Amino acid sequence: MERFAELVLRHRRLVTLLWLVLLVGGGAAASQLSDRLSFDFSLPGQPGYETERQMVATYGVSPQDTLVPVLAVPEGQTAQGRAADVAAVFDAVRSQLPQLRVVDLASTGDSGFVFADGRRTFGLVQGGQPTGFGPGAEAALRPVFEQAAGARGLEPGLTSYQLLAAGGDTTGPSVLLETLLGAVGALAVLIFVFASFLALVPLAVAAVSILTTFLLVLGLTFVTDVSFVVQFLISLVGLGVAIDYSLASTVCARPWSVRPATAPR
């Protein structure tokens, strides 16, 4: 390690230039990486996974791409009594969004689409398999469904596996923004520890290492599927290890001074 450090110091300008190239290349790769990551979960042998595979094989859909629009009629009325209005809402969805598959009470005649209170009914809407955390088919369905329901005096609601998993919010900060927020907190701690501009060194190391890893993973996505979870692990581990190693290097470079014991009289 000593010889390696001496080599780096002798060629510090070249090393610095290489770091800058990797930093810029990694930044460019980070903006493209999310679109190439896989959002598929595979848990062979688990009941939920096997059931989902059977649903895909039988019906061509899965819980991942199924939306559940719900309609409620006013107090004192029933969904069966307003069947024509309910059917018109789902027909509006079919006509305006032909790329979606819609199944409801009117198309099946199945009373199982009506809730026990009799005032609410639901449908099943399938779109394409999701490719990310974005709203997907929900973004197209919601305005059409709500407008059609409101025009007929019905109260609309919309849920799905994806919406429940996201807590009802389909937007959020990017991985890089989340990393920057974590870096700001880490910087506050490092300023307290170093009390100098050295506090920026661990973050510089983290920036280069994280973005360089993004660049390597982007190349890996052309060879095999890579889970989207990887991007979060890269940011978390990259930031943590950079800070940890920087603190360890500081301790090794500036060991604690030990005052010699006073000789007994």
Image: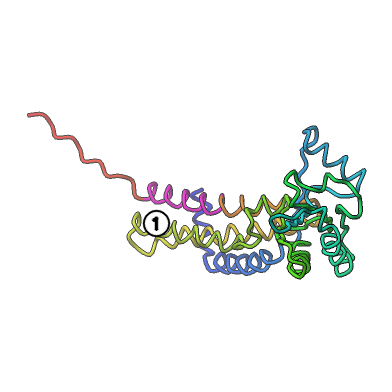
Q: Secondary structure at mark 1?
A: helix
Q: Total of numbered circles in the picture?
A: 1
**Quick check: 84 left or right of 173?**
right
- The outermost residue toward the top is 264
At 86% from the left and 52% from the top, the residue drawn is 105
Q: Is residue 12 above or below residue 104?
A: below
Asked if residue 243 is among those painted magenta in the image, a careful observer would answer yes
> Label 1: few (<14), some or many (≥20) within 10 Å?
many
Q: Residue 172 at x, y = what percent? A: 61, 62
Colour mode of the rendering:
rainbow
**Quick check: 121 left or right of 207?**
right
At 63% from the left and 67% from the top, the residue drawn is 27
Q: Is residue 220 visible?
A: no
Name the residue nearer the viewer: 93 or 191.
93
Q: Residue 163 at x, y = what percent? A: 69, 54
Range covered by the magenta-colored residues: 237-253
Q: Is residue 137 visible?
A: yes
Q: Quadrant of the C terminus?
A: top left
At 64% from the left and 56% from the top, the residue drawn is 168
Q: Amino acid at mark 1?
A: Leu
Asked if residue 176 is among those painted magenta in the image, a careful observer would answer no
Quadrant of residue 146 within the rendered picture: bottom right
Quadrant of residue 31 within the rendered picture: bottom right
Name the residue nearer the viewer: 104 or 22.
104
Q: Residue 118 at x, y = what percent? A: 76, 48
Q: Main secondary structure of the magenta part?
A: helix
Q: Residue 45 at x, y = what percent? A: 80, 32
Name the residue nearer the viewer: 246 or 123.
123
- The outermost residue toward the front is 76
The residue where tag 1 is placed is 190
Q: Is residue 54 above or below residue 184?
A: above
